[in-house]
Image: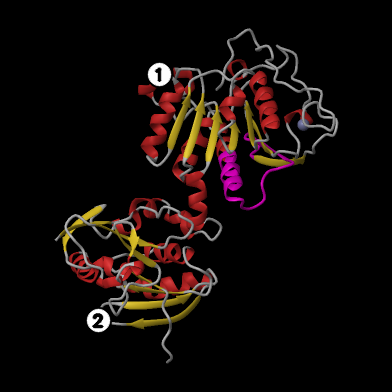
Amino acid sequence: MESIQIDQELNIKGEVCPYTFVKSKLALEDMESGEVLRVVVDHLPAVTNVPRSLTNEGHNVLEVAQISDTDWAITVRKA
Amino acid sequence: MPVTVYIPTPLRRYTENQARVSTEANDVASLLDDLVSRYPELKTHILDDNYEIPRYVNVYVNEEEIHSLQGKGTRLKDGDQVAVIPAMAGGAQPFSEDQIKRYSRHIILPEVGGKGQRKLLEAKVLLIGTGGLGSPAALYLAAAGVGTLGVVDFDVVDMSNLQRQVIHHVHDLGRPKVQSAAETINDINPDVKVIQHNTRVASDNILDIIADYDVILDGCDNFPTRYLVNDACVLAGKPNVYGSIFRFDGQATVFAPGKGCYRCLFPTPPPPGMVPSCQEAGVLGVLPGIIGVIQATEAVKLILNAGEPLINRLLLYDALSMEFREVKIRRDANCPICGDNPTIKELIDYEQFCGIGPATH
Ligand SMILES: [Zn+2]
């Protein structure tokens, strides 16, 4: 898979739902349309909740990947 | 070399809230290395994966951006001042952790989001009266994070108020209502700046009082104040979120500039004594909870520019039959104040009714 140019990274390990989504949404609000945010979480429900909520808001979730035993990275392009 | 690094507010959450961090470093590269080794969370915000400074971060040494010096190789000497400044969108202050939690249910809403919450925090709403209507309106506007709430009242808290004026408590009896209201508002939300206007609105002060506010919420209980607030809002071009209650019935609407006013509905007040006041007629204690919160809802919608405002629609509520009705209202081209050829060009102090002292509750 082609590597994705990440414009911003948000490390919210330790954060739980719904704040994982709230913080992801706030980070995207401060970015430009088309830019890519990578969100790192370690709260398992967030791995499904955050991409779903971001998709509902019209953003394009590019990738959801486990990056370590505990951590997941959600990569999303701002609508 | 002891060097001071200035940390701007967006990054301070990663430096244990310290605005200035002291470090020993001979050049910018080793300073940044030292910084991120002490505050690992800072790393993704000021350095990329190759430990380079990303384009959206600028580093200054004694107010000179390092690209105009020697970049990361810029030498540092004792007492130098270094600042690490990330790009910020719109210059908006980031939310604190407490604010993110407090307003999370707003931020989640697509119609609000962080942008809408910032609008609320920057908004200024004036509550005319901290009585039956003003109380619930103020409580919810405070909880919602409206950043500035003005409260106008000249009255003190009386035992007979507590049946419906829920912002005041037993320990407030005898205190000025604006003081009691301000205290309750800040107990709910310390983000809110409360401006106390411990005065009776009149033709000689109302324009000054409303001048600084974005939205006026009229929760008064008497005709002289009702007309005064209406006329002042028309003259000043302020949206007037109207509510009134009587026995078991309530009304609410929004008078927006250019779209009609209270005088389009009722050009002049009834003669003194025609209509009984709350004191004589009674009022169901829970009634203002409904109407005041409808007013607060409309104020929030105006601030957010969301949904369909209650403009040109008069909402009528009957608590006994538990029915809501709506009637259309229109701007009257012959309205004495907002019509095409207005006859009222300055504010009028109408005679207070009922032989009882004027009231704003
Ligand atoms: Zn009018």
Q: On what subunit does the disc labeled 1 rest? A: B
| Residue, far bottom | A1
Quadrant in which the C terminus of chain B appears: top right
Q: Which residue matches tag 1?
A: B175
State which region is magenta.
B294-322
Instruction: Decide if residue B152 is on the left or right side of residue B21.
Output: right
Q: Nearer the viewer, residue A2 or A41?
A: A2
Observer-nearest of B45 and B352:
B45
Residue type, numbered disc 1 = Arg
**Quarter of the rendering occupied by the N terminus of chain B:** bottom left
Residue type of the residue flagged with mark 2: Asp
- Mark 2 residue's CB less than 8 Å from ligand 1: no
Residue lying at 44% horizontally and 62% vertically, measured from the top left: A26
Which residue, as the protein is rendered here, is positioned at the far top? B355
B302 versus B23 height, above or below: above
Quadrant of res B83: bottom left
